[in-house]
Amino acid sequence: MDDPQPDLTEVYDATTRYLRTLDGLTSESLAEPSLLPGWSRAHVVAHLARHALGFTRALDGARRSAPVPVYDSPEAREAGIEETAALPADDLREFSLDACGRWRDAAEHAPDPDAVLELFPGGRRLTAAASVGMRLFEVEIHHADLGCDYGPGDWPDAFLDRAFNTVVDDRQDGPSMMLRTPDGDVLIGSGYGPAVTGSRADLTWWLLGRGEGRGLTTDGELPTLGPWTRRTPAT
């Protein structure tokens, strides 16, 4: 893919929208299920906060020429989410606001854009520049995962374009189909397969492994998708 990386302003705007939603959630609503199986809304909030802190330390480490991974291990990542999700609502909001602020400071004083960050020791690598795009994806998609008053139809056009192009590319090794969008037809795989019609927002949401195809129509059976996995290089 050749999409340019988003600038920091896009992430700041997305974060402001997300934090506004978070500010309106009560203890009861945070405890309710999110749109992600097995996760409450508090888990989604905790993940976004921990993601911000993990990239903060990785960016800071790269700037000091003392690299550290975003997460120490998959197990440490999961434990951190569970611990943070258990915080009282006010503490969780304060923790989240602080984490987002720390990420902003780290991003504004980021190292060389080509500095390489590791998600886990010996795991997936991406550049400091690409981490901005990853953070934007995390905030926008998980904001919608809260299942409140923000969904894929609310995504800014620039983000929707980037997300649609990304997931279409990521799904090229999956079931072949034709996506019929208001802006034209898009092939996945060979294109031989059912035609799936819908808005770019609804199609993107489904290709991300969410929504079970709500808002879509097809001339055959809706293809069964596996979990979404980033296929495109994070550079």
Image: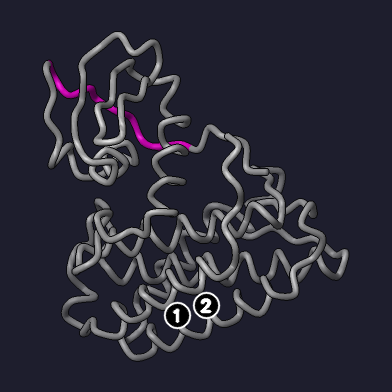
Three-letter amino acid code at the position of disc 2: Cys
Mark on residue 96? 1
Could you say whether the residue bearing mark 2 is in a helix, strand or loop?
A: helix
User: Magenta stretch containing residue 183, yes or no?
Assistant: no
In terms of depth relative to the viewer, which is nearer, 9 or 21?
9
Q: Position of residue 117 (x, y in %)?
A: 72, 54
Crowd class of label 2 (few under 14; some 14 to 19; many from 20; radius 10 Å): many
Q: What secondary structure prevails in the magenta region?
A: loop
Q: Position of residue 29 (x, y in %)?
A: 18, 76
Crowd class of label 1 (few under 14; some 14 to 19; many from 20; radius 10 Å): many
Report the residue marked by disc 2. 100
Magenta residues (range): 220-229
Query: Image point 47% across, 72% down: which residue?
Result: 49
In terms of depth relative to the viewer, which is nearer, 92 or 172?
172
Could you say whether the residue bearing mark 1 is in a helix, strand or loop?
A: helix
Quadrant of the rendered structure where residue 134 is? bottom right
